[in-house]
Amino acid sequence: MDQGEIWAVGGGKGGTGKSFLAANLGITLANQGKRVLLIDADLGCANLHTCLGIDYPEATLSDLLTGRIKRIEQAIVPTGITRLGLISGAQDILAMANPKHAQKTRLLKQIQELDMEYIILDLGAGTSFNVLDFFLIADQGILAVLPEPTSIENVYRFIKSVFYRRFRKIAREEAVREIIAQAMDQKNENGIKTPYDLIKQVARMDGAVGELLKNEMYSFRPKLVVNQVRSKDDITLGFSMRSSCTQYFGITVEYIGYVEYDDHVWQATKRRRPLVTEYPMSSSARGIKSVAARLVTHEQLTIDYLVDTAPRR
Amino acid sequence: MKPLREQNFYELFEIPVSATREQIEQAYALAKKTYGEQSLAAYSLFDSEERKEIIRKTHLAYETLSDENRKKQYDRDVLGLAVPEKPPQPAGPVKTTPAAAASEPPKDIAAPVEIESLTGTLLRQVRERRGIPLQEIADKTRINITYFEFLERNQYRSLPPSVYLRSYVLQYARILGLDPVRVADRVLFLVEQSKGSGKRSV
Ligand SMILES: Nc1ncnc2c1ncn2[C@@H]1O[C@H](COP(=O)(O)OP(=O)(O)OP(=O)(O)O)[C@@H](O)[C@H]1O
Ligand SMILES: [Mg+2]
């Protein structure tokens, strides 16, 4: 059996629609006949179960991480949707100490051994190591951004943090690690502003590591979803962010679609019902479906898309 | 990926050398929007001087690429591309559909291709003879068409790092019906070799 593909939804800022996207992408895949597991990896602030309209379950991810339950299967609860399972997160921050890297790795191994085709991780806000590590573990890292300055800035900070975390893992040597840590500080004295500068600096210290980091730049391809769009400019923003990331970070961000701002979302939320189940024909549900389709086929939007003025799906 | 000052106009616009007029227009419009005064996407990464710098290069790129003669000259002088007099004609009969041609075992070309003399140009000739559009390979492999264009134009220094390149060339060669491993080895060798010589990219 093939291992399931892991998707992680992150993006830095709170309230950008990460849980909303994770839940509805999961349902969309399950409705298409895929076996899907949703995992609420928002440790301390779990609410994915609410997006699915179910009560906070008995067994959760923290039970698994603390070893209270042994087998991952025991933590999966049904969602009322065929082929879609859920592992809920911890709601109490105190109960959920920071899992060690080894614990996360073991969890990952167990996840991959499950008979699932897709595993979707809903990440918390912020750029804690937990969030970054889960994002890095995923086959497809999805960034949810809102078309507003603070959210965009947060996504960039998120990208940078993920990136440097990855770099640090590759670089074993203390001196190189030190440079990477310094680079995180925007006003560092080495004049390192962008990953380009960093890689150049590292390559001077150790050519082989510089080469490794460069390869890392090529393989790191986060996916971007613009949520709550209200205008054509909001749709264009995804392309602009893609270009900016190429110019600044030297990485390829794939723009995989957008979801319109839609009153149906809060109408569904109020009734504790998932959007795509409750309003499958709404504009936002259609947006989710095309995002899901592009993730499955590994496609992205091309700028020809903008030629048609009318939103097209 | 390269920093701005090392990017050529195609890299700046993220379009293939074969881009249509329309694609060039679109890319230009997007760049103006992305790095302009009202920019939401770029202001936090680039200060206004840096954005002006990008815009300046964008104007120049547009002026050059939208003028057929200047584009030709640019392709020749900066990219080092030989500009064909006529649009390349597929040599030999290409009656089979591209897909069928791709799966057919190589008859005509395979034997005569001396691996020691294999270059990007020769790969292009093989491909054209097989009647397989480059776009089709890019679509099938989901690999950026620009890389294949660089490869076929012997622009080895513009190719991605070898770990990726190897897998790209393997897939490319497989579609052409050539021995993937030998072709990949050869291309990587050419890349290594090109690192010694100093052709400047802009
Ligand atoms: N396309 C949309 N149209 C209208 N409302 C939306 C849309 N997407 C999300 N929302 C609303 O925005 C709010 C935040 O969404 P959500 O809880 O999914 O964000 P989050 O990123 O998971 O937040 P947190 O970081 O706190 O976990 C919710 O009330 C949700 O219903
Ligand atoms: Mg959430």
Image (cartoon, coloured by chain):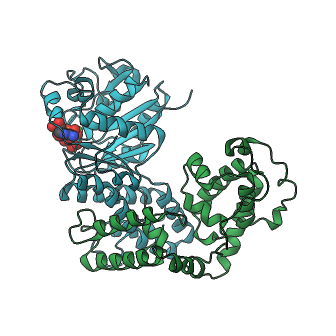
Whether residue A290 is visible, yes or no, is: yes
- In the rendered image, the vertical position of residue B179 relative to residue A187, given as above or below: above
Q: Among the chains, which one is green?
A: B
Q: Name the residue nearer the viewer: A250 or B17.
A: B17
Q: Measuring from the top left, give residue B161's x and y in whole percent.
A: 58, 63
Q: Among the chains, which one is cyan?
A: A
The part of the image, by quadrant, that contains residue A72 is top left
* Total marks in image: 0
Q: Measuring from the top left, give residue B64's x and y in whole percent.
A: 46, 78
Query: Horizontally, is A93 left or right of B62 in the view?
Result: left
- In the rendered image, the vertical position of residue A102 relative to residue B168, given as above or below: above
Query: Horizontally, is A13 left or right of B182 in the view?
Result: left
Q: Quadrant of ligand 1?
A: top left
The part of the image, by quadrant, that contains residue A24 is top left
Q: Measuring from the top left, give residue B181's x and y in whole percent.
A: 75, 53
Residue at the spot 71% in from the left edge and 45% down from the top edge: B102
Residue at the spot 81% in from the left edge and 67% down from the top edge: B117
- In the rendered image, the vertical position of residue B47 relative to residue B33, given as above or below: below
Specify the quadrant that holds the N terminus of chain A.
Answer: top right
